[in-house]
């Protein structure tokens, strides 16, 4: 009888601790969901425009991403995760470093867009006035066809004739690796062609130049570091 009586207060104590822990967790979640608003940036006026432009190719109903981000209600629960992914440059999955080549359909966030998204999240991720919400894009751009391949550069390649390069397509790069592709021109100047950072084979793609590059004969195309994969040049 004594041993049974001894178990009762311990059991009640455990129950009380569990209830306290559950209440604390609920309070923490509620506080996180309704934190103080410390920014004038809002979803309707500022952030929705960035998401519509950069993210809806994948983050839409029927898209390749696991969740849509079309509305504030869909986006707000993921605010902290979105902040982390964009600051680490994992999302949008563009892969190429900005300023190292000028490409069509560039999904990468600008530095200003990064700051706006991060400041919005840090400021409580407010929704804002619905009257400022833009219409969502009704038709998403079609996924571009793979660029035609004309020649491969494994370590380096010297152009025997003038070339007009319209696209580069990395191939065989390791996951998480970083690579640069440059052109050393005959006058010793260097043209930056492509810089792949933290490569993810799942999002491998061709990179089409906004304006085709005219490279003279004698130009040396280099993939750095050497023996790290290859890049296909698409000529016109």
Image (cartoon, rainbow, N blue to C red):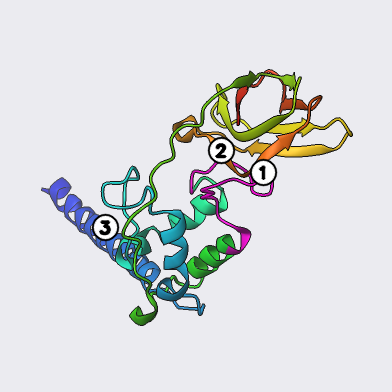
Dominant SS in magenta: loop
Q: Give percent across and percent down for residue 159.
A: 75, 22
Q: Is residue 29 visible?
A: yes
Answer whether labels 2 and 3 touch (C-beta < 8 Å): no
Label 1: which secondary element: loop
Residue 98 among those drawn in magenta: yes
Mark 1 or mark 3, which is nearer the start of the sequence? 3
Label 1 Cα crowd, 10 Å radius (few <14 / some 14-19 / many 20+): many
Residue occupied by mark 2: 207
Residue occupied by mark 1: 101
Kindly report the distance in space between the C-alpha atoms of the residues bearing marks 2 and 3.
Answer: 55 Å
Q: Give percent across and percent down for residue 84.
A: 51, 53
Q: Which mark is residue 18?
A: 3
For the residues carrying marks 3 and 1, which lies nearer the camera in this image? Answer: 1
Q: Is residue 229 visible?
A: no
Mark 1 or mark 2, which is nearer the start of the sequence? 1
Answer whether labels 3 and 1 touch (C-beta < 8 Å): no
Answer whether labels 2 and 1 touch (C-beta < 8 Å): yes
Kindly report the distance in space between the C-alpha atoms of the residues bearing marks 3 and 1.
Answer: 57 Å
Q: Residue at x 62, y 20 (%)?
A: 152
Q: Give percent across and percent down for residue 26.
A: 30, 65
Q: Quadrant of residue 73?
A: bottom left
Residue closest to the far left: 1
Q: Eyeballing the image, is 151 above or below 92?
A: above
Range shown magenta: 92-112
Label 2: which secondary element: strand
Q: Eyeballing the image, is 194 above or below 175?
A: below
Q: Residue at x 51, y 48 (%)?
A: 105
Q: Is residue 124 left or right of residue 216?
A: left
């Amino acid at each position: 009888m004594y041993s049974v009586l001894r178990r009762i207060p311990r059991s009640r104590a455990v129950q009380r601790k569990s209830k306290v822990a559950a209440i604390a967790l609920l309070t923490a979640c509620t506080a996180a969901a309704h934190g103080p608003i410390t920014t004038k940036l809002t979803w309707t006026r500022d952030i929705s425009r960035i998401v519509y432009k950069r993210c809806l190719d994948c983050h839409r109903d029927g898209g390749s991403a696991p969740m849509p981000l079309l509305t504030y209600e869909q986006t707000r629960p993921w605010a902290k995760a979105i902040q982390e992914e964009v600051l680490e440059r994992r999302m949008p999955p563009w892969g190429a470093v900005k300023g190292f080549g000028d490409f069509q359909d560039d999904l990468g966030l600008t530095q200003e867009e990064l700051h706006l998204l991060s400041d919005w999240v840090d400021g409580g991720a407010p929704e804002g006035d619905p009257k400022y919400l833009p219409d969502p894009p009704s038709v998403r751009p079609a996924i571009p066809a793979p660029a035609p391949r004309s020649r491969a550069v494994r370590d380096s390649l010297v152009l025997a004739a003038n070339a007009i390069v319209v696209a580069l397509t990395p191939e065989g790069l390791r996951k998480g690796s970083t690579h640069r592709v440059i052109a050393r021109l005959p006058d010793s100047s260097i043209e930056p062609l492509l810089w792949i950072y933290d490569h993810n084979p799942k999002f491998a793609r061709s990179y089409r130049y906004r304006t085709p590059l005219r490279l003279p004969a004698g130009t040396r195309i280099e993939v750095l570091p050497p023996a790290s994969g290859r890049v296909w040049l698409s000529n016109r």
